[in-house]
Image (cartoon, rainbow, N blue to C red):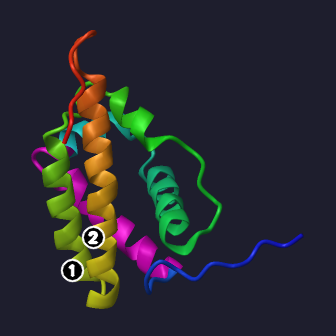
């Protein structure tokens, strides 16, 4: 039985996804807040970018080439703070609007912000002391 092919969430190509990921992480490596953290944890940038591009191809194009748990990865790194996600997302948006056409950048940024809000909440919740009331946002 073959699975139906879903159309992309919004107009995007694998080449556009690769261009965004490459441009974004070039900026991240130079960023005063995010650069030191990413540079401490990422030892193979091409492999990291390939993995993140696969994540976005899955999220946008419904390709099945990504497996992983990005929430867990961020929770396991104590130097990743919940308040950093706003800066991460602002930088992502800036790069997207400089790299992609508006019909791709705008919905992709909206998707990234939804995912980022969930990741931020998950990291914040994981860092709460045992027995603390849940964070409701």
Task: State the residue in front, 137 or 8.
Answer: 137
Q: Where is residue 60 in the image (x, y as percent from the top left)?
A: 48, 71
Helix, strand or loop status at disc 1: helix
Task: State the residue in front, 129 or 18.
Answer: 129
Contact between labelled residues 1 and 2, with CB atoms less than 8 Å apart = yes
How many tags in the picture?
Answer: 2
Task: State the residue in front, 35 or 103.
Answer: 103
**Residue 25 in view, yes or no:** no
Looking at the rendering, in which quadrant would you find the N terminus?
A: bottom right
Q: Residue furthest top?
A: 130
Q: Where is residue 89 in the image (x, y as percent from the top left)?
A: 20, 58
Q: How far apart are marks 2 and 1 (CA)?
A: 9 Å
Instruction: Using the rendered view, name the quadrant where residue 58 is placed.
Output: bottom right
Mark 2 or mark 1: which comes first in sequence? 1
Left or right, 55 with respect to 82, comes to right
Q: In the rendered view, would you say 124 is above or below 105?
A: above
Q: Where is residue 107 in the image (x, y as percent from the top left)?
A: 32, 77
Left or right, 63 with respect to 26, comes to right
**Residue 72 in view, yes or no:** yes
Q: For residue 109, which numbered disc appears in the image? A: 2
Report the magenta stretch's main SS: helix
Q: Residues within 10 Å of mark 2 (few under 14, many from 20)?
A: some
Q: How crowded is mark 1: few (under 14 residues within 10 Å), some or many (20 or more)?
A: some
Label 2 or label 1, whichever lies nearer to me, is 2
The boundaries of the magenta stretch are 14-34
Q: For residue 51, which numbered disc appears in the image? A: none
Q: Position of residue 21 (x, y in %)?
A: 37, 66
Q: In the rendered view, would you say 26 is above or below 121?
A: below
Disc 1: which residue: 97
The residue positioned 37% from the left and 26% from the top of the image is 76
Q: Residue furthest left?
A: 32
Instruction: Using the rendered view, name the quadrant where residue 44 is placed.
Output: top left
């Amino acid at each position: 039985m073959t699975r139906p092919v879903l159309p992309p969430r919004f107009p995007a190509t694998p080449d556009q996804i690769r261009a965004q990921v490459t441009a974004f992480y070039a900026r991240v490596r130079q960023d005063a807040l995010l650069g030191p953290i990413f540079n401490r944890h990422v030892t193979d940038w091409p492999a990291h970018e390939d993995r993140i591009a696969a994540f976005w191809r899955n999220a946008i194009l419904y390709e099945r080439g990504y497996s992983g748990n990005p929430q867990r990865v961020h929770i396991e790194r104590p130097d990743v703070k919940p308040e950093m996600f706003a800066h991460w997302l602002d930088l992502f948006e800036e790069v997207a609007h400089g790299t992609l056409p508006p019909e791709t950048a705008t919905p992709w940024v909206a998707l990234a912000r939804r995912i980022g809000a969930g990741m931020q909440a998950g990291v914040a919740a994981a860092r709460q002391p045992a027995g603390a009331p849940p964070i409701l946002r």
